Amino acid sequence: MSTPASLYLDFQIDDTPAAQAKSVLSAAIEAAPVASVLLRPGQGAKIDSETVRPLIALAQAQGIAVLIASETGETNMLGADGIHLIWSQDIIRSFKTARQSASDAIVGADAGRSRHDAMELGESGADYVAFGIPPHVEDREKAAQRQRDLIVWWSELFEVPCVAFDVPDSIAAHALAVVGADFVSVSVTSSDTAKDAADRVRAFSEALRIPETAT
């Protein structure tokens, strides 16, 4: 039996008070086991040290690796454990920039829907490759099937871990875990209530623990 998928918390920091962001993140990571936390700015928000450093410390105190989202590969890690590269047309160039500037850190990248980019990222030393669904994609159902196909392909051929991003609900989380995702992301924002964040994380965690059916 394959190793069960782990939970990857994708935490979006909106333009909310720092205390609220900390409260929501605390509720989320206490609700269920979380392997990694990604901190990313929401629309119109910024990653600033006053807000982010307490969040990093909070997660790291629980033994959770923390990554900072970057579009270019250039970022101030603020004491985090690594960098996550958001998908772009220049993802390979961005990854190489990040790998050079953070040689001892975790560096993962979203390959979007490109097998070529995924392979090049893996060969270039990515600590994980992520497959998400870009926000501009209109046919989400078709994109979700392509995402599952990519994860099946990757998990059968490569040893570098893969992460499923842009997962809408716990049903989809379970399906992605079954087909081979090593990590499944659950999205929470600092605008959520602590209860809603905890409930969502708990639901995803329970979905990943459901025994796999025969394939």
Image (spheres, grey):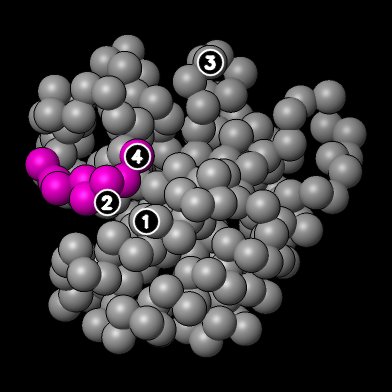
Foreground: 154 or 47? 47
Q: Position of residue 190 (x, y in %)?
A: 40, 77
Helix, strand or loop at label 4? It is: loop
Question: Which is nearer the N-term, disc 3 or disc 1?
Answer: 1
Camera-side mark, 2 or 1: 1
Camera-side mark, 3 or 4: 4
Classify the position of the C terminus by image quarter.
Answer: top right
Magenta stretch encompasses residue 107: no
Residue sitting at 48 percent across and 69 percent down?
Answer: 25
Camera-side mark, 4 or 2: 4
Q: Answer with left or right where residue 194 lies relative to residue 178.
A: left
Amino acid residing under circle 3: Glu
Helix, strand or loop at label 2? It is: strand
Q: Answer with left or right where residue 182 lies relative to residue 142.
A: right
Q: Position of residue 94 (x, y in %)?
A: 14, 35
Amino acid residing under circle 2: Ala
Residue 115 in view, yes or no: no
Quarter of the image where one finds residue 90 = top left
Residue 20 in view, yes or no: yes
Q: Position of residue 143 (x, y in %)?
A: 46, 52
Camera-side mark, 2 or 3: 2
**Residue contact between numbered discs 3 and 1, judged by CB atoms under 8 Å:** no
Which residues make up the magenta segment? 74-81
Please name the residue that numbered disc 1 is placed on. 56
Residue sitting at 83 percent across and 24 percent down?
Answer: 1
Q: Answer with left or right where residue 207 lies relative to residue 61.
A: right
Cα separation between marks 1 and 4: 9 Å
The disc placed on residue 81 is: 4
Cα separation between marks 3 and 4: 21 Å
Please name the residue that numbered disc 3 is placed on. 159
Question: Which is nearer the N-term, disc 4 or disc 2?
Answer: 2
Question: Which is nearer the N-term, disc 2 or disc 1?
Answer: 1
